[in-house]
Image (spheres, rainbow, N blue to C red):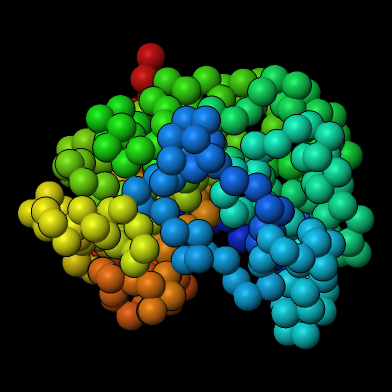
Amino acid sequence: MSLERFYYNDFSSFLRGRFGCKVQKISIDAGFTCPNRDGSKGVGGCTFCNNQTFNPSYCRGAVSVEQQMREGISFFSHKYPQMRYLAYFQAYTNTYESLSVLRERYEYALTVDGCVGIVIGTRPDCMPDELLDYLQELSLRTFVLVEYGIESTNDATLLRVNRGHDYSVAVDAVCRTARRNIPVGAHIILGLPGETRAMLMQQAAQLSALPLTTLKLHQLQLIRGTQMAVEYESLPDDFHLFTLEEYVETVVDYVERLRPDIILERFTSSSPKELLIAPDWGLKNYEFVEIVKRRMRERDTWQGKYYSAVV
């Protein structure tokens, strides 16, 4: 294995291999909510969540799906005229509506020139079989990736952050999706309160046992306007916020234990300065990636180096 050629499976290379060109996700706010916001599961949402942290300026629910797509494409196309795009239904829970409404909004996005598929961000407790049946049919016509917010594999953590489901629900949703040959991703937050390094390394093994196509990681961030920020102010000793050096080592350790074929989309999240309480490392995502690669080279390591399949 040449470490100059391989540290981990990155998402941009996966997309270029699939489509033969550079592909950019365009974030969409389709006007949905979440079951732990509207009272069906709970109120207030997940304690860590403030959707303003990841919605770009063109992504706003008061504007149609098609217009958000066109504004997003306009934002990127001047730099990369040959780029193609994925409609990324990102804000809140993008399967939490009737099938007829979901079908309409997904397919509106696909009508925009340059759109080559959709990515659907959702919760694992909001994926009925009838919707999976439709997505299976849609995946025969275009690219479809379903991305589940799993956040943690530890049930005590999920309860603490007001997630509204346990890990078994995530396992079930991932497996039901993969059985339909739909690429499936997971989103995980590293450093949630109460989780130790040993727990995170075990988490890497647990996720590797699932039929995941992609995985997103990011550090715990404390964001203004969230319940977790209030908890931190009252009980700061309950939280361990990574230093940059600690987080780099944690990511490398984690990646070493992941199944080698999982595609890693990102390692960090960058929240707006006006919303971010901590940690603030002052780095762009691509700068963090270069630090991780350098550290992997120094440690003579790669994705899956210590992976062991569970029999």
Q: Is residue 3 left or right of residue 20?
A: left
Residue 144 versus residue 98 in the image, above or below: below
Which quadrant holds the C terminus? top left
Identify which residue, 73 or 208, lies in the foreground.
Answer: 73
Residue, x 38% and y 79% (percent of image)?
273
Q: Residue 151, located in which quarter of the rendered image?
A: top left
Kindly indicate the quadrant of the structure image that contains residue 281.
bottom left
Q: Is residue 76 above or below residue 189?
A: below
Residue 113 shows up from this direction: yes
The residue at 71%/53% (across/down) is 30
Q: Residue at x 44, y 59 (%)?
A: 50
User: Residue, x 89% and y 61% (percent of image)?
Assistant: 112
Residue 262 shows up from this direction: no
Q: Is residue 171 left or right of residue 77?
A: left
Q: Is residue 47 above or below residue 260?
A: below
Percent across and percent down for residue 274 are 38, 79
Residue most extreme to the left: 237
On the picture, is 311 further left or further right than 132? left
Q: Position of residue 212 (x, y in %)?
A: 54, 34
Q: Nearer the viewer, residue 181 or 241?
A: 241
